[in-house]
Image (tube, rainbow, N blue to C red):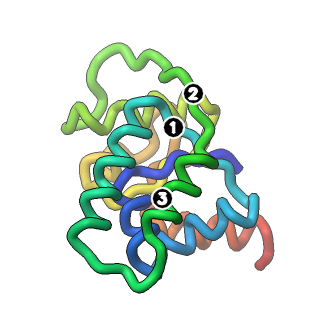
Amino acid sequence: MRVVYDANVVAAGVVFRGEAWACLVRLARRQVFAYGSEFTLAETRETATELIQHRKAVHNAAGVLIWYLDNLKIVSPAPLGKQRSRDPDDDPYLAAALAAHAPIIVSYDKDLLALGKPFGVEVLKPAAFLKRVTAAYHC
């Protein structure tokens, strides 16, 4: 399953051991394949690095971030035409999902979640996404 993870999900996943971490575990198990653009890659790196610096993780959070960035497949963003999200920094996630033919964006971002299902791309919170993947893989 192709997916685009929002920067905040990745940041939470590399620092904390919760639903966002479980989303990254699905990538490690090759149950999902993560996609992004140069913009989403840069925002993810910045957001996660900032959280790593402010929180003292008991594990190698920087190593997890590097692993994620190494496993992210980069696509050229699809054109969206006009701005779709209330926050223009969220549109690149939708553009990356369209370019990657990813049916899901995983996010905690209220502006992205408010979009619902633009262009047929669902925007789900990590818990809903994990239920979907679990049902698909019966694990």
- Report the disc number at residue 65: 3
Which badge, 1 or 3, is on the more N-terminal residue?
1
Is 93 on the left-hand or right-hand side of 47?
Answer: right
- Report the disc number at residue 75: 2
- Relative vertical location of residue 111 with respect to residue 12 in this rendering, above or below: above
Q: CA distance from mark 1 to mark 3?
A: 14 Å
Residue located at (38% from left, 31% from top): 39
List x then y, in percent, for residue 88.
Answer: 23, 31
- Relative vertical location of residue 104 with respect to residue 77 in this rendering, above or below: below
Is 11 on the left-hand or right-hand side of 97?
Answer: left
- For the image, the number of numbered tags is 3
Which badge, 1 or 2, is on the more N-terminal residue?
1
Name the front one of labels 1 and 3.
3
Residue located at (38% from left, 48% from top): 44
The three-letter amino acid code for the residue at tag 3 is Leu
- Relative vertical location of residue 58 with respect to residue 138 in this rendering, above or below: below
- Report the disc number at residue 36: 1
List x then y, in percent, for residue 56.
Answer: 29, 79
Q: CA distance from mark 3 to mark 2?
A: 19 Å
Label 3: element kind: helix
List x then y, in percent, for residue 31.
Answer: 74, 60
* Residue situated in front as seen by the camera: 35 or 106: 35
* Residue situated in front as seen by the camera: 37 or 45: 45
Q: CA distance from mark 1 to mark 2?
A: 6 Å
Label 1: element kind: strand
